[in-house]
Image (tube, helix red, strand yellow):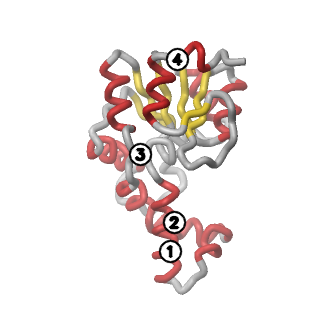
Amino acid sequence: MRIGVDIDDTMCRTTEIVHEYIEKYAQEHHLNDLDIMNDEVLKREFFETYIEQIYTNAVIKRSCADVIRRLKNKGNEIYLVSARSDTFFTNTKHHVLEITEEWLKKNGIVVDQIILDAFGDKKAEICKKYHIDIMIDDNPFNYQKILEKGCKCILFDDRAKYSLDENYATNWIEVEKVVEKNYFDFFHRK
């Protein structure tokens, strides 16, 4: 089976570390935290300054590495499909792909392929193009677009942000159960 996995806020706690760095940036520049994300120039400067540290230091979610390792060891192909991109950042010393590969290595995760620049409708198109059997993503927009392309998707939500009755997992152990044991039933509930 080909399993697609989003990185940020699915595999790791990106939002939390972004907020930490926003506070730091705001203090350094005598700004209000909210001003940074509401002003396109400030937001771009913030991410140009801290994107490497954010991606490098994002904390992996509990059981994520173990579940991906077990799924991979059972013969599944793991594709990371992420909106991460070099397109937005010109001041980084390393490419986003290199930073991501180092983060995976640090966390003991081996994947078959990393596909970047997958944002908006493009993520769903990539799932279809690469014949992803099931995608795991934290974004409801991506979830809906992937389903519309005829692909299966699990909405990953470990912070109780959404209320969904179907195709929903709150932790990586649930993801593993869906993929390994309950795949058919999970997507055919009434």
Label 4: which residue?
Answer: 182
Between tags 1 and 3, which lies in front?
3
**Looking at the image, which residue is at 63% across and 73% down?**
34
Check if mark 1's residue and mark 3's residue have beta carbons within 8 Å: no
* Spatial CA span between label 2 and label 1: 6 Å
Q: Are marks 2 and 1 in contact (CB under 8 Å)?
A: yes
Q: Height in image: 102 above or below 2? A: below
Q: CA distance from mark 2 to mark 4?
A: 36 Å
Mark 3 highlights which residue? Answer: 61
SS class of the residue under badge 3?
A: loop
Badge count = 4
Q: Are marks 3 and 2 in contact (CB under 8 Å)?
A: no
Q: Earlier in the sequence, mark 3 or mark 4?
A: 3
Residue position for label 2: 19
Residue 146 location, x and y as percent? 65, 28
Q: Earlier in the sequence, mark 2 or mark 4?
A: 2
Place residue 118 in its image quadrant: top right
Image position of 29 with respect to 158: above or below: below
Of the image marks 1 and 3, the number of the one nearer the N terminus = 1
Crowdedness near tag 3: few (<14), some (14–19) or many (≥20) residues, C-alpha within 10 Å: some
Under circle 1, the secondary element is: helix
Dot in front, 2 or 4? 4
Who is closer to the viewer here, 37 or 181? 181
The tag on residue 23 is: 1
